[in-house]
Image: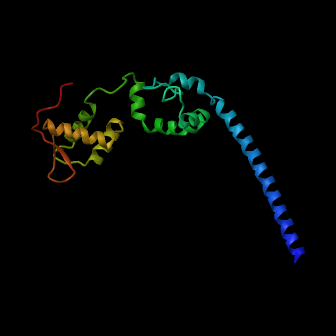
Amino acid sequence: MARTTSNHTAINQLQDQIEAVRREAFAAGYAAAMQAVREVAAKPAPGAEGAAAAQPARRGRPAGRPRGGAQRSARAVRSAAQPAARQPRQRRAAAAKPATRAARASGGGRPQRGTNAKLVEDVLQANAPRALRPAEIRSAIQREKGVAMAFTSIRHALGQLEGRRVAEQVGDSKTWRHSGSGGGASAD
């Protein structure tokens, strides 16, 4: 019996030593991997020199400046240590807004006030006596004008047109049509 207990003790000690060596090796490998990630993140992306200069000026607080005065939040420390982690999201956001980017690239800057209502009115007038759902209005604007418009913007424009009596909602349905006898659109 004493021999069995000493075998179990020796096996437990051996397992503890193996576990300690495994943890040390993991910690060393993790530290080396994180150092490699920091080094890669510190290098600029290929071709990033010209892209950084071509980006439009941002509004609000400059990048890298902490929010709460001298103290840096945990989020700011994480983002400063790993700037490459945010690049895919920024690329997706840029790809999701081709119409805005195209409008700014053409020298127009921000679209003129009332543009969305005018686009929605044009689509309703072109399809006049037929009533359209917001999804049909959106796809028509995308197809004809090449502008991607959010449903919220379409609903807001429809509310504006309804207030001017240029468009009307058909009964309790979710369809809209050009009223024809409205107060008229704004002059161009």
Work out which quarter of the rendered image holds the N terminus and state it.
bottom right
Seen from the viewer's position, the closer of residues 6 and 123 is 6
In this picture the colour scheme is: rainbow
Seen from the viewer's position, the closer of residues 112 and 60 is 60
Q: Quadrant of residue 10?
A: bottom right
**Which residue reaches farthest front?**
2
**Which residue reaches farthest right?**
3
Please state if 81 lies on the left or on the right of 169 as rendered. Answer: right
Q: Is residue 16 something that shows in the picture?
A: yes
Q: Quadrant of residue 164?
A: top left
Seen from the viewer's position, the closer of residues 79 and 55 is 79
Please state if 100 lies on the left or on the right of 25 as rendered. Answer: left
Seen from the viewer's position, the closer of residues 138 and 10 is 10
| Spot occupied by residue 110 in the image (x, y as percentages of width and height) | 35, 26
Q: Residue at x 83, y 57 (%)?
A: 17
| Spot occupied by residue 106 in the image (x, y as percentages of width and height) | 40, 24
| Spot occupied by residue 163 in the image (x, y as percentages of width and height) | 15, 37
Q: Is 86 located above or below residue 172 in the figure?
A: above
Q: Residue at x 59, y 27 (%)?
A: 48
| Spot occupied by residue 153 in the image (x, y as percentages of width and height) | 29, 39
Q: Residue at x 24, y 33 (%)?
A: 118
Q: How many labels, in total?
A: 0
Q: Is residue 140 something that shows in the picture?
A: no
Please state if 165 lies on the left or on the right of 23 as rendered. Answer: left
Work out which quarter of the rendered image holds the C terminus and state it.
top left
**Which residue reaches farthest left?**
181
